[in-house]
Amino acid sequence: MKKYSIILILSLGLFFASSCSDFMDYPPPTEISAGDVWTDGILAEAYMFRIYFTFQDAGFAEETLASATDESMFIHGREFRQTMAGAVNDLQLGYIGKTQSGHQWQRLYQSIRWCNDFIANIDAATFDNRDKNQLKGEAFFLRAYFYHRLTRAFGGVPLVTNLTTLQDDPASFQVPRSSYTDCINQVLSDLDQAEPLLAKYTFANTQKGRATVAAVKALRVRVLTDAASDLHDEPTATAHSDIFASYKNKELLFYNKGSRADRWNAAKTAAKNLMDNPLGHALPTFGGDGLSVEDKAQAYWNQFNQDSPDHIFSRYFIFTKDESGTKFSLFNGPAGYHAWGGNVPTQDMVDAYSMADGTPFDWNNPAHKAAPYKNREPRFYACIFYDGAKWIPRPSDYAIADPTGTIETGYYQMNPSDSEAAYWPGMDTREGGGENWNATFTGYYIKKFVNPRDGLHSNRINAVFPFIRLTEVYYDYIEACIELGQLDEAKTYLNQIRHSVGMPDITSGNQAELRKIYQNERRKDFLFEEQRYWDMRRWLIAKGAPGLNSLKGVKVTATLKPGVTLAPGEKYSHDESKWNYTYTVNELTVEPRSFPDKCYFMPIHRDEMNRNLKLIQNPGY
């Protein structure tokens, strides 16, 4: 008799704050059969929560997807060095295939099977203490989401929508890859099935973390935007890369439904549908035009450390539960706070933030080079820790060296006779007095999502990781408008988003220029939200993205001004009246970076190819 791991299922049910007091009345898990799930709504709901746990730590694991892009680097290397060097193959999948749980082939197909189980059995369930329509709608939504993740990584994949068992003919497990078009059609069909079932479930009346009708609509927008993009357009992609042009099974990679304009119009229409009726969701605002850059930066930072109507589908973490998702501040905070500084922004990412007046930052501009952290846009100050940035007080043992709570990623002359080799290394450097073996290589730390509870980065925190935000729906709408040549419409909505963070209007009337501006705006607004990895692929921009083909950081040195001497025992504190600061951008060799065209799609592991002889490998592997 088949049995479920009910202990795990019930523990996950508690996370979603169900009415679980009567769980204690249940028999031991070894006595609960699969059939029991369909006679008791509490068990069925717990089973559904187990499927949700496919998302595990979402984007808040120790190793983030940002470090598989030009956003950041993971300082401990591990599988990232293989991934970032473009050295993945069908035996060594690198970070995405081995560590990043959200896109692992086996995990996703296991969860798809659970969804199939739900869809096959929920209608005949005999319980009446849970809404069967909600549970069935969630099963369709989650199956769509899991297939969506597979198509992003692999293109067309085997479609299995029936419930398989060990009693089935073994030949039935030899399922070929479906075309990319058929996979997208299946995802959209599942979303069409989910929408009426979840029609009454909204942000206001649904347990946090569960799918709503807005989540269905928003995922549809993302899927249609993916399908319309360059990577999945055969003429565009084959002109871009010889490995796509010579690949014999192009149907596995490219979308062939309608014209290019039809595809973008479908994405645009789906986005506008949710924008016009956001179902309780709303774009974030960061104060009026009269607010200072500092106030807007604070409001922007706050947005990512609390729940928000901008969040459409998210993973929620509570500090009382020991999960990696509660430890983002420990994993990524500055080293001089007893934090690990694991995923640190690259120089390329830092340079993407504009000046406060909207002009691009440029190291060739003498004023920018002399003071690169002054007069930048609010999102820069909300998202990036840099040398001289004010933060919270240090832990007591480190406050002795830095009583001011200022980020120190530079090297500072403390005696006029000191040579540069003797400069004092800041608390947050790899030679400093903090957790120096964990410290940054690039000279930066991430600030977005870092929110230490009670002032200690080692404390677990409440956190929300947004898989989909309403802001993304707006960005997808803007992108569709740009690709359709509707530039004035695109600028209207892009400027609406920019105004909220204190940025001036975009005025360009050139499609190519506006596309580049849009892509950079999207890069900044979704920093560390697992968007960039997929965006840079679907846009086919890897060859022209410096941070994917090299890794750079900054060295900050502070030299005492002529005639300045420090008082005996005086500690270093960022002070431009005492020190002259210089900033030198350096090429880092600790992680060689390269992006060959094969990396636009993941390889299918050889074990999977051997299990299923009908599978066809992706190009370049």
Image (cartoon, helix red, strand yellow):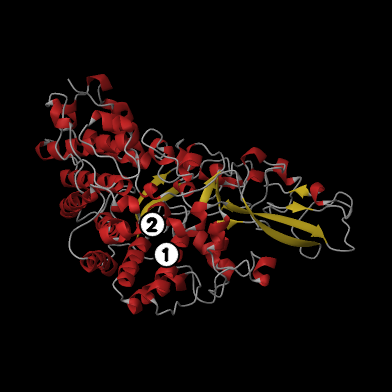
Position above or below: 12 against 259: above
Residue 473 horizontal side relative to residue 421, left or right: left
**Mark 1 near mark 2, Cβ–Cβ under 8 Å?**
yes
Residue appearing at x 67%, y 56% in the figure: 387
Q: Amino acid at mark 1?
A: Gln
- Percent across and percent down for residue 571 are 80, 51
Residue 535 is tagged as: 2
In front of the other: 324 or 68: 68
| Residue at the spot of label 1 | 519
Q: Residues within 10 Å of mark 2 (few under 14, many from 20)?
A: some
Say which element carries label 1. Answer: helix
Q: Quadrant of the C terminus?
A: top left
Which label's residue is closer to the chain start, 1 or 2? 1
Location of residue 617 (image quadrant): top left
Position above or below: 94 against 527: above
- Percent across and percent down for residue 174 are 18, 32
Position above or below: 126 against 353: above
In front of the other: 469 or 562: 562
Position above or below: 485 against 554: below
Q: Residues within 10 Å of mark 1 (few under 14, many from 20)?
A: some
Say which element carries label 2. Answer: helix
- Percent across and percent down for residue 214 are 27, 58
Q: Looking at the image, can residue 319 be seen? A: no
Residue 53 horizontal side relative to residue 382, left or right: left
In front of the other: 485 or 462: 485
Q: CA distance from mark 1 to mark 2?
A: 9 Å
Q: Quadrant of the N terminus?
A: top left
Residue 180 is tagged as: none
Q: Amino acid at mark 2?
A: Asp
- Percent across and percent down for residue 150 are 29, 44
